[in-house]
Image (tube, grey):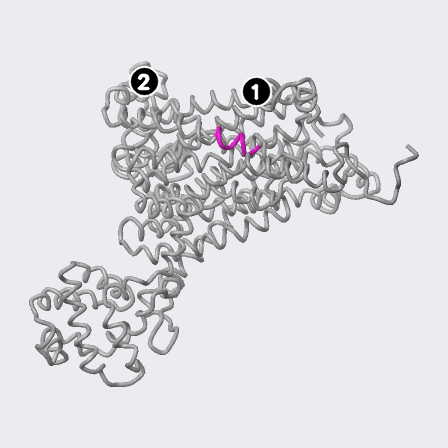
């Protein structure tokens, strides 16, 4: 039904094109809010709307001043560094534990597989505010509240479901006879894992890691409760900015974050296609 | 081969019965799998499950009354809360002793705060008396009943004693009852006064708005998923990026975009004024109300609806639709009777996912919801970080968690958590 047959009636034609228009509007709804902030972030004025100069495409109306503010403002800079210190460590923890467990889960005989899976996926399902509240109480008790380690552990827990989901999905297509062949030829389990299994599931592991990274990099509810001023991350700073005095610097930060998302999305798409090719399927 | 008798059990190469040998190999396999999973399971238990358990326990934990007023709790158990008489001298003496100890340890304000949740006004009675009682000699300066009542006539209030008696046990349903606008009186469960009833409204609003958001996602997601599933793969992949980009974009970026777009001086209002649809003097109020939350959250959750629908629609064979039409069905009948029923699993999966995510949302309602568009999560956050009524926050959280886990279970039954796909 992708193209209109030549014998279509007028009614069919009208419906065909109006359906396309409706879908176009929905795509517009999906993408426009993200796109519109990009030109707004180059506004020379401290407004959140297009100035007449901008609409005339007058160079006077555009400037990089919000970006300069972001890169020179201490609180934004420290927030960015905090984010960059928390997210990679949390990602490493999630990927390490998560990959190991995903390999365990994809064995043929795993007792309580369903229950274990449900527990491991639960951080994604439980509302963040509940996780945040629980962690706030419990981490205060064991002295982790307000510490770097506390935030990292919390973010690692939130990232684990994504690693489990992507890595188990990759392992579904994994040919078990390859590891048996390796063992048969004298490789020990460690060599088999690193030389045979790991290279094949690597795309899944990396995309799981990217999901875990973006989860931590984008997370604000848990860090609000578990962190203290010393762990103020970029999303936290944005949240404060949006709630209290909304400054146009947020637009510049948002644009930078959109650029990061586009980069990550591209990497994940490329990895997905590669992993499908490795599995012997043509990229869909 | 002739000397092997078929009467005994079949043996493996090392002489053990094959059955046992296989069972052992299977056990080893299971143990190896569990060993691989164990570190993560332990990690999740400590960093995630235990904290949630801790929060759930807080919603029924009432040990503070027993720990701060141990003698009073014992003494008051002999008193009948239904009677119209104040407790006897023994209870007052026990209270004076407890209050003195508590005031010295500075814990009397905490128990005062706890009891104040159930009977507003009790905090000041405890606080004011605690300061004075600290200087008393509590072994031989009776009668304490008269002295306490003289100190603060709140101690002559029957309701106060009934509250102490009702909330003297180590565990209480009080927070849960409070979370559904009820309270535990001396004669059992009763409805809270009208001006204190806010939680039911909040729970119902959260459910109603989540349903509206889920429904808008279905209405907007269905045509897009259909288009994606019926376009040639290369074009569909290109359009899919338009769905995946919002999915990957920071939640705060999307929320700030809506906050900026929906303002009265924002891009949407400006465009409408420019088009002449809306008068400059009465620009639309699109933010800080329910509408703002619904628009922003529909946008944020739409990809979670489109992706499961798309993966189901991809598997539907287009020849069914052609068959229906060739048998004389109109376009509508063919769609409604043949195509639509096959997409129901996708709609179900997407709807449960969107509803689960919507019910627990915190950031977006907090930023664009104002006071009318906030969710139960915002109330939980308020009780935990601002009001300090942790028990009530935990009870509200437990109710929300129960709803979400129930849906999670349903999702697992009909879709299977193994089938969750990302991107």
- Host chain of mark 1: A
Tag shown at residue B169: none
Residue B240 picture quarter: top right
B148 left or right of A193 in image: left
Image height check: is A151 above or below A191?
below
Quadrant of the drawing holding the N terminus of chain B: top right
Disc 2 marks which residue? Answer: A62
Return the residue nearer the eye: B281 or B60: B60
Place of residue B292 in the rendered image (x, y in percent of width and height, measured from the top left): 40, 43
- Say which residue appears at 26% left-offset and 32% top-offset: A230
What's drawn in magenta, residue-wise?
A95-102
Image height check: is A213 above or below B105?
above
In the orientation shown, which residue stands out farthest toward the top? A59
Place of residue B236 in the rendered image (x, y in percent of width and height, measured from the top left): 63, 26
- Host chain of mark 2: A
In the orientation shown, which residue stands out farthest toward the bottom? B84
């Amino acid at each position: 039904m992708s193209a209109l047959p030549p014998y279509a009636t007028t009614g069919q034609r009208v419906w065909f094109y109006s359906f396309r228009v409706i879908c176009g509007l929905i795509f517009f709804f999906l993408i426009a809010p993200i796109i519109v902030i990009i030109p707004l972030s180059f506004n020379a004025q401290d407004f959140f709307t297009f100035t007449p100069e901008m609409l005339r495409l007058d160079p006077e109306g555009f400037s990089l001043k919000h970006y300069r503010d972001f890169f020179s403002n201490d609180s934004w800079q420290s927030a960015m560094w905090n984010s960059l210190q928390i997210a990679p460590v949390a990602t490493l923890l999630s990927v390490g534990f998560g990959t190991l467990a995903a390999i365990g889960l994809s064995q043929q005989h795993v007792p309580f597989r369903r229950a274990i899976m449900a527990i491991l996926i639960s951080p994604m399902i439980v509302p963040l505010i509940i996780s945040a509240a629980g962690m706030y109480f419990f981490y205060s008790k064991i002295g982790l509240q307000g510490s770097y380690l506390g935030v990292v552990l919390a973010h690692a827990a939130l990232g684990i479901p994504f690693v489990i989901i992507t890595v188990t999905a990759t392992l579904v297509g994994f040919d078990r006879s390859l590891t048996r062949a390796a063992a048969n030829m004298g490789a020990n389990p460690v060599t088999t894992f690193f030389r045979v299994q790991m290279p094949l599931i690597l795309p899944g592991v990396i995309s799981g890691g990217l999901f875990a990274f973006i989860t931590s990099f984008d997370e604000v509810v848990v860090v609000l409760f578990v962190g203290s001023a010393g762990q103020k991350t970029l999303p936290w700073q944005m949240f404060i900015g949006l709630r209290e005095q909304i400054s146009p610097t947020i637009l510049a930060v948002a644009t930078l974050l959109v650029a990061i998302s586009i980069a990550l999305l591209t990497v994940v798409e490329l990895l997905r296609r590669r992993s499908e090719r490795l599995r012997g399927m043509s990229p869909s | 081969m002739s000397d092997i008798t078929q009467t005994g059990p079949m043996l493996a190469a090392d002489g053990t019965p094959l059955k046992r040998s296989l069972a052992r190999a299977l056990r080893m396999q299971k143990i190896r799998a569990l060993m691989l999973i164990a570190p993560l399971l332990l990690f999740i238990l400590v960093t995630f499950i235990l904290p949630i358990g801790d929060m759930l326990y807080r919603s029924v934990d009432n040990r503070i009354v027993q720990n701060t007023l141990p003698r009073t709790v014992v003494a008051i158990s002999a008193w009948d809360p239904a009677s119209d008489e104040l407790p006897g001298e023994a209870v007052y003496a026990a209270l004076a002793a407890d209050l003195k100890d508590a005031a010295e340890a500075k814990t009397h304000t905490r128990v005062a705060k706890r009891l104040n949740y159930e009977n507003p006004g009790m905090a000041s009675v405890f606080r004011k008396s605690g300061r004075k009682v600290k200087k008393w000699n509590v072994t031989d300066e009776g009668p304490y009943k008269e002295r306490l009542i003289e100190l603060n006539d709140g101690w002559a209030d029957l309701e106060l004693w009934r509250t102490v008696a009702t909330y003297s046990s180590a565990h209480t349903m009080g927070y849960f009852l409070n979370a559904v606008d009820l309270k535990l009186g001396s004669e059992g469960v009763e409805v809270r006064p009208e001006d204190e009833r806010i939680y039911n409204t909040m729970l119902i609003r959260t459910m109603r708005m989540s349903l509206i958001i889920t429904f808008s996602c279905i209405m907007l997601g269905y045509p897009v998923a259909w288009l994606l599933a019926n376009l040639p793969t290369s074009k569909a992949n290109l359009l899919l990026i338009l769905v995946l980009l919002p999915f990957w974009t920071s939640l705060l970026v999307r929320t700030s975009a809506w906050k900026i777009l929906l303002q009265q001086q924002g891009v949407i209002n400006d465009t409408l004024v420019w088009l002449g649809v809306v008068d400059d003097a009465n620009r639309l109020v699109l933010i800080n109300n329910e509408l703002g939350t619904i628009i922003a959250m529909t946008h944020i959750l739409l990809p979670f609806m489109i992706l499961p629908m798309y993966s189901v629609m991809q598997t539907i064979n287009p020849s069914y639709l052609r068959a229906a039409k060739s048998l004389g069905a109109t376009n509508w009948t063919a769609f409604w009777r043949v195509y639509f029923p096959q997409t129901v699993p996708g709609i179900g999966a997407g709807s449960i996912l969107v509803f689960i995510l919507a019910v627990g949302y915190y950031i977006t309602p907090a930023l664009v919801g104002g006071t009318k568009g906030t969710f139960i999560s915002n109330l939980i956050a308020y009780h935990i970080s601002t009001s300090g009524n942790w028990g009530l926050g935990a009870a509200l959280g437990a109710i929300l968690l129960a709803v979400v886990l129930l849906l999670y279970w349903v999702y697992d039954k009909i879709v299977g958590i193994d089938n969750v796909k990302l991107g």
